[in-house]
Amino acid sequence: MIGITIIWYGEEIEAKIASQHPSNLSKKQKIKASDLMNIYTFHRIEKKDYPNFFQMEMENFSVASFFTGFSLNNYVGLPNYSITVFFSNKDDDKDNLSKDFEGYLRRIAYELIPKIK
């Protein structure tokens, strides 16, 4: 694992990193705004407004991401956030995630994201 981010998606179709570990993750890995928006787009296409989880490979890294949901009626923690874990494309851990991994990210979203505000 390279690191983890909490990403907030604004109403103006924008993505901002609300928190990251390590603190220089986005700079060190050269994570671009377009990468963050690609993650968001995939979440919205996959399950529209509802909380959802996916894994995918991107150009410079792979991600496992949980989206808290867009709907004000159905979300985890707070709407419009994702907990995204970044992996090196060479990292074997990304291929061996336990079936509980989504649950772990869901729990982080439930407990941690409301404390960000």
Image (cartoon, rainbow, N blue to C red):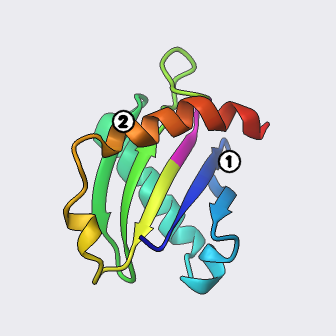
**Judging from the image, what secondary structure is the residue with disc 1 in?**
loop
- What amino acid type should be assigned to the residue bearing mark 1? Glu
Location of residue 114 by image quarter: top right
Does 93 lie within the magenta span?
no
Q: Is residue 68 visible?
A: no
How far across and down, in percent of the image, does residue 90 sit? Answer: 28, 84
10 Å crowding of disc 1: few (<14), some (14-19), many (20+):
few
Does 80 lie within the magenta span?
yes
Compare residues 7 and 46 and report the one nearer the observer: 7
Tag shown at residue 12: 1
Q: Is residue 64 visible?
A: yes
Quadrant of the rendering where the N terminus is positioned? bottom left
**Judging from the image, what secondary structure is the residue with disc 2 in?**
helix
Task: Name the dominant secondary structure of the magenta segment.
Answer: loop
| Residue that appears at 60% across and 85% down | 28
Mark 2 or mark 1: which comes first in sequence?
Answer: 1
- What amino acid type should be assigned to the residue bearing mark 2? Gly
| Residue that appears at 57% across and 58% down | 5
Q: Is residue 110 above or below residue 64?
A: above
103 relative position to 12: left or right? left
| Residue that appears at 52% across and 14% down | 73
Total number of numbered discs in the rendering: 2
**Magenta stretch?**
78-82
Q: Which residue is mark 2?
A: 103
How far across and down, in percent of the image, does residue 97 sit? Answer: 25, 56
10 relative position to 43: left or right? right
Residue that lies at the very extreme toward the top in this rendered image: 73
Q: Is residue 113 above or below residue 2?
A: above
